[in-house]
Amino acid sequence: MLRVVAAGVRARPLRLLLSAVAIALGVAFVSGSLILSAAVGAGLRAAVNYQTRGVDAVVDQTRGGGSGLDDALLAKVRGVPGVAAAEGRTTVSAPLRDATGHARDAGAIALPADAALRPFDLVGGRFPQQPGELAMAETTAADFTLGQRVTLFDQQGGAHPFTLVGTFSRPADAGIGAEDLVLTPEGLRQVAPEAAYDEIVVRAAQGVAPATLVAGLDQAVGGKGVRVVTGADAASELLSNAAPDSAGLTKFFTAFAVLAMVVAAMVIANSFTILVAQRAKELALLRCVGAGKRQVFGAVLVEAGAVGLVASVAGLFGGLGVAAALQAITGKPGAPVYVPLSARTAVLAVVIGVVVTVLAAVPPARTATRVAPVEAMRTPVEGRRARAGRPRTIAAVVLLVAGIAAAIGALIAEVEDGAVLAVVAMVALLGALLAVGPLLAGPVVRVLGSVTGPVLGEPAKLAALNADRNPRRTAATAAALTIGLAVVALVTTVTAGVEAGQGRGVEQQLAAEFTVTSVVNGQQLPSTLPATLAAVPGVAAAAPVTEFTGDLGKLGAYGMTAVRGDAVGTLLKPVVLAGRLDRLGPGELAVSRQLAEETGLSVGQPVRTSSGSLRVVAVYDSVDAPGASLGLGLVDLGELPHVALADSEHDGSVLVKVAAGADTDRVRAGLDHALAAAPLAQVNTIADLEDQLSAPLRSTLDLLWALTALAVLIAFAGIANTLSLSVLERTRESALLRALGLTRGGLRATLTAESVFVAVFGAACGLLLGVGSAWLITRVASTAAEPVLFTLPSARLGVLLAAAVLAAPLAAALPARRAARGSLTAGMAAA
């Protein structure tokens, strides 16, 4: 039987190659997803290696150890035996004036005197040597040229001129931070005079082991809030602190790997079903010459395993290109691309490909064992009709009822339970759609044939007949496209709903037209700024807002916001769930829904703090917007000194309301002019805030589209595969049509139209399922403060449908060309 299988593979290389393409694409997505997950870790390790290269020991503070890392301690460290070099490290905020003339935040570090302890590499020019010189990271220096004057600002907004003398590179921050600027120690003190060291890094003298160095340093400077660890331990700690952030990306990529393999498995199963159907006579002959059912079953699975193995190896290396391409598409310009291929990834990808291929071939292999030997004596009937049976109909009805019941339950349940039921409903409805596909395929393609018939003529009618001849095959071919487009349509529509909801939430909460914030997080704006902005012509009111950490006594410390009492209800209008919030007075406290749920606070309840008492007057729900986030609690500005923790950072902003009838553009120009004396302040409109809130959503959506594109590509490979096998199956029929007068162009048009009908059917089902599921999710997830609006992104969905319709002829190009070039006589003689 092995020789028979080998002979069969040699005899049908084209047919098996078409199935191998689907397998290779699926495995490429799986291996690409695994490599992307590993690339996240590789980028993180590269960043950590740069940060700790040359470092044999690190002196830093214990938790709550104070600020004891200063020049005196650094001098003491340098005097310890076995120390070759020691450098104090600190990253400070040094806003710079960009090419547009506005200030933007940037991180700066002092240049270590010891070259081995520099966590960056020189790219162009030189490192700074004078206090008035600086070097920039390559990505930051894109808008600057060497020799150009660059203005940096200190924390008070004072301007300091520097000359750009060099550029440097290092891996992206990968969650551990990456400096934009390198200054001399003297230059760093200009923008941050009181900056203390975050850590002191030490390089050991030649021949001194890190453990010995750490022991000596610990004896000399350890204790009293200062600890000493080896460079390797510091790197491990830094890696472990940043690693949880990469776990979410790993799960994200894994989910799409599963999606790709589901789509590929459907294509593979469809391909082997067609292959087995076409080989009915061959399998029957094997039975006639003595092959048993088990031997036939095993032969089909061995053939599938062999094809799966070869295709999986090809797909594994294709995954390297997929991972590199996705990093290049979604990463920052100039960011390094990592393609780490581990033995685990290689084995897992190949095993998944082979196992999925074999499992997908099991149903057609079982069908092969049912072929009676008498079939060998008959001429195969081309294109036998295969429609959905009663079990499939029953399964579709059960899944449909379950999906509708889960959807109704999701609409009436709480948000958390509703989300679970919504997922159950989506899965059940998808199963119902796939089960009922053969029942829908025939009527849909017949309608499409009738609609396009007057335009396309006979090719459209023949295409509809071909697609309707085997509805199961048509539905199975379209199902892969349905799944891919359903996922894209779902996420695209939900994302549009979140964006629209965020915009409405911000507009509901903010009655002000502008917010003025600092480009430096945690930096207060000048106390006189609200009055200055209020004096701008056309401004009706300007109210300060301060975010801080508040002390609520026994309840604990929470992020809170202080605002002028009369601004509540006029400039700020959060959604009130209980009580009243038309203004805030002394001794009054409004709490968020989250804080109320965590602490059990309710309207009228007193809250004792270390310096007095507050009374809860309202429970609210709010939207977090830059410069207008209300935190977990809201108090009058006069309560700020009594409630704020002593070491709390205050992040300030100003809300500006335009007078009725005033020209908003003219007011904006007046605000910009008034802020000339406060260069660290920036003005944002409501539209700016909405754009900032939606930017992460757009980045995620772009990544999702890039990932799902490959799943859709697999689906179109399935269409091409099915059509190619169908061309081989209908060789005699095609030759007969040619003999009856159908031209080569007409035959090509027939197959092209058939591919478009299948694509339209699959795309329509996917879009309907995705949009319907999105509607359910928006209804379940929407709240009063953070509404999620059902908004149809018509342009993006139109692009999806157009891409499906336009890509279908490309998928049919090669099969159509092969059918049209076939010989009439050879086709008529085909058995």
Image: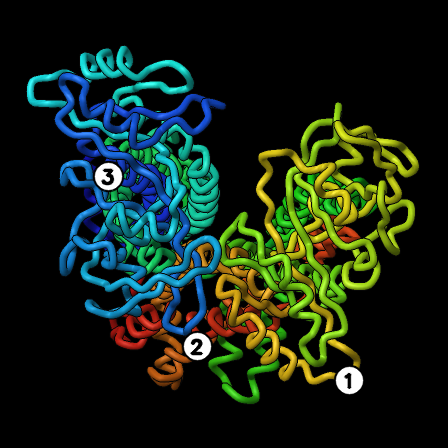
- Mark in the foreground, 3 or 2: 3
The secondary structure type at the circle numbered 3 is helix
Q: Are marks 3 and 2 in contact (CB under 8 Å)?
A: no
Question: Residue 772 at x, y = what percent?
Answer: 69, 58
- Quick one: 814 or 188, which is closer to the camera? 188
Q: Which sits earlier in the primary sequence, circle 3 or circle 2?
A: 3
Q: CA distance from mark 3 to mark 2?
A: 60 Å
Alpha-carbon span between mark 2 and mark 1: 64 Å
64 horizontally vs 91: left or right: right
**Percent x, y of residue 45:** 29, 36
- Give the mark toward the camera: 2 or 1: 1
Rendered image quadrant of residue 626: bottom right
Q: Position of residue 266 (x, y in %)?
A: 46, 48
Report the residue marked by disc 3.
50
Q: Earlier in the sequence, mark 1 or mark 3?
A: 3
Q: Position of residue 590 (x, y in %)?
A: 82, 44
For disc 2, the marked residue is 750
Image point (81%, 41%), residue name = 413
- The kind of residue on which mark 1 rests is Gly
Quadrant of the snapshot with the N terminus: top left
| Residue 371 appears in the rendering | no
Residue type at tag 2: Thr
- Identified by mark 3, the residue type is Tyr
Taking 605 as reference, is 594 left or right? left
| Left or right: 305, with 669 as reference point | left
Q: Residue at x 75, y 36 (%)?
A: 595
What residue occupies the far bottom of the structure in this picture? 455
Question: SS of the residue at dot 2?
Answer: helix
> Which residue is rendered at x = 67% and y = 64% of the image?
530
Mark on residue 661?
1
